[in-house]
Amino acid sequence: MKKIAVFPGSFDPITRGHESIVLRARNLFDGVIVAVGQNAEKNYFFPLQRRMEWISEVFPDDPAIRVESYQGLTVDFCRQQGALFIVRGLRTSADFEFERSIGQINRQIYPGLETIFLLATPEFSALNSSIVRDIIRNNGDPRPFIPEAIHKDFV
């Protein structure tokens, strides 16, 4: 049986930290699904289709990495995809406490589902999409913080 992992998030936009987590997860699993969650109550800065296109541009030639969107519970999406692993990146101890609680509840809902935590590398531990959005919103240069494959959209 293939080991499939889901890396859920809004990716609004994808950052170099996200890219790092996906590439590292790729070394651990047979397949990684970058799952772009849709929440009707959340106002996204970038449209869903654009976020998915960017992720596809960042990982263009690896058939083991694919991009999907979903609504609802992440555990339900994992079940539909046959995934037994959720990958989460941790930047801080606060991230750990938040993600630990979600991981424990997810496992109660979907027994056998494991949440795997990957520590952010030091150069990305302060980086998040909110910071990148603020840079973009204020006409700053986000390129140091986003994957090189999408720099062309921010020149």
Image (tube, rainbow, N blue to C red):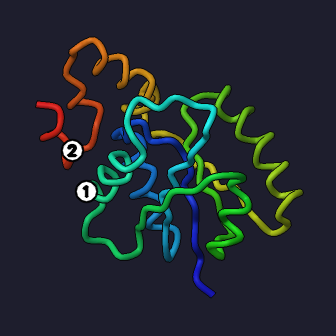
Of the image marks 1 and 2, the number of the one nearer the N terminus: 1
The image position of residue 39, as x and y in percent, is 61, 40
* Residue at image point 42% right, 67% down: 66
Q: Nearer the viewer, residue 68 or 108?
A: 68
Give the label on residue 150, or none. Answer: 2
Dot 1: few (<14), some (14–19), or many (≥20) neighbours within 10 Å? some
Give the label on residue 78, or none. Answer: none
Please tell me in which quadrant of the rendered image residue 82 appears: bottom right
Relative to 73, is 37 on the left or the right? left
Relative to 99, is 128 on the left or the right? left
* Residue at image point 62% right, 52% down: 71
Residue farthest toward the bottom in the current orientation of the protein = 1
The image position of residue 65, as x and y in percent, is 41, 68
Q: Are marks 1 and 2 in contact (CB under 8 Å)?
A: yes
* Disc 1 secondary structure class: helix
Q: Label 1 amino acid?
A: Glu
Give the residue number, with chain letter if any, for mark 1: 57
Q: CA distance from mark 1 to mark 2?
A: 7 Å
Image vertical order of residue 27 relative to residue 18, above or below: below
Quarter of the image with the C terminus in it: top left
The image position of residue 121, as x and y in percent, is 43, 39
